[in-house]
Amino acid sequence: MRQEEGWGSYVGRLGAQLHRRRIERGLSQETVAYRAGITRFTYQSYEKGKSQSGAPANPSLRTVIALAEVLDIPVAEILPMSPPHMSR
């Protein structure tokens, strides 16, 4: 599997996890984005797993931590298991 394909799958699972946790908390995308210090459009991209260009999304570590805080869960619960190998 190419590195980009592995990353795309991983970010897709991350987006599904963000969506699920947001719905469980009864929060809108706009509320999560505002509280995390990002735009609603950017947050929507993370839930979709895609950037504006169509490439896999790539949230910063700061953003992942902020989203975990807003959703009131540990960072480890946001990140999907089995990340892709990125050093290839």
Image: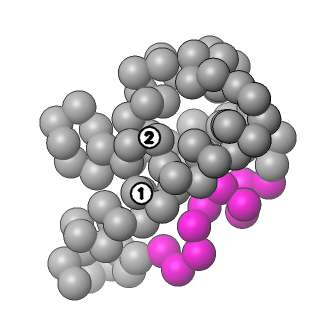
Q: Earlier in the sequence, mark 1 or mark 2?
A: 1
Residue at the spot 48% in from the left edge and 30% down from the top edge: 43
Q: Is residue 38 magenta?
A: no
Residue 78 in the magenta stretch? The answer is yes
Q: Which residue is mark 2?
A: 46
Which SS type dominates the magenta stretch? Answer: loop
Label 1 sits on what residue type? Val
Label 2: element kind: helix
Residue 13 placed where, x, y %? 48, 61
Contact, mark 1 vs mark 2 (Cβ under 8 Å) = yes
Q: Is residue 25 left or right of residue 47?
A: right
Between 30 and 59, the one nearer to me in the picture = 30
Compute the Cα span from label 1 to label 2. Answer: 8 Å
Location of residue 85 by image quarter: bottom left
Residue 83 image point, x, y percent: 48, 74
- Indicate the secondary structure of the residue bearing disc 1: helix
Task: Report the side of 2 relative to 64 (left or right).
Answer: left
Which residue is painted at 59% across and 75% down in the image? 81
- Measuring 72% from the left and 54% from the top, which residue is drawn there? 75
Give the residues in magenta: 74-83
Circle 1 sits on which residue?
A: 11
